[in-house]
Amino acid sequence: MAMTETRPAPPAPAEAVAEVVPSDPPGLAGWLMTSDHRRVGRMWIVVSLLFLLGGGVLGSLLGLERVQSGFDILDKGTFSQIYTLHGEVAVLLFLVPKLAFADVDEALLEEQTEAVEAS
């Protein structure tokens, strides 16, 4: 004697529910309040380069001070403070963020190289 199994009918397909994804506000507010990892990475790199520029300006000011012995732009205390600030900006605000993304930069370089070789 054959045995058959009775299964319930499959449920009717549910209507596609559109997932509401909040979008970033337009303009500068959108860039500053974003959670998009690509935008955050770009901002990280831009800010790091801005600190490089600021450190370069401080270094140039220090170089101008040392050009001639009688050419005093800064007094002795201010020179020491700017020298320290220049070193801190160079190391902590430029090199550390840049080294944090060193592997990302290398991966991007490899992707670009592969794309050029493929074309």
Image (tube, rainbow, N blue to C red):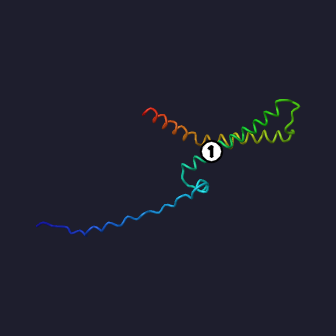
For label 1, the residue is 46
Compared across the picture, whether 61 is left or right of 35 comes to right
* Residue 118, image x, y percentages: 42, 34
> Helix, strand, or loop for circle 1?
helix
* Residue 31, image x, y percentages: 59, 53
| Image quadrant occupied by the C terminus | top left
Q: Which image quadrant is residue 11 in?
A: bottom left
Q: Is residue 14 above or below residue 90?
A: below
* Residue 46, image x, y percentages: 62, 44
Q: Residue at x 82, y 39 (%)?
A: 80
Q: Farthest residue toward the left?
A: 1
Q: Residue at x 72, y 40 (%)?
A: 55
Q: Residues within 10 Å of mark 1 (few under 14, many from 20)?
A: few
Q: Residue at x 76, y 42 (%)?
A: 85
Q: Which image quadrant is residue 79 in?
A: top right
| Image quadrant occupied by the N terminus | bottom left
Q: Residue at x 61, y 57 (%)?
A: 29
Q: Farthest residue toward the right?
A: 70
Q: Is residue 72 above or below residue 93?
A: above
> Total number of numbered labels?
1
Q: Nearer the viewer, residue 88 or 31?
A: 31
Amino acid type of the residue that numbered disc 1 sits on in the rendered structure: Val
Q: Farthest residue toward the top?
A: 68
Q: Nearer the viewer, residue 18 or 7?
A: 18
* Residue 25, image x, y percentages: 57, 59
Q: Nearer the viewer, residue 77 or 54?
A: 54
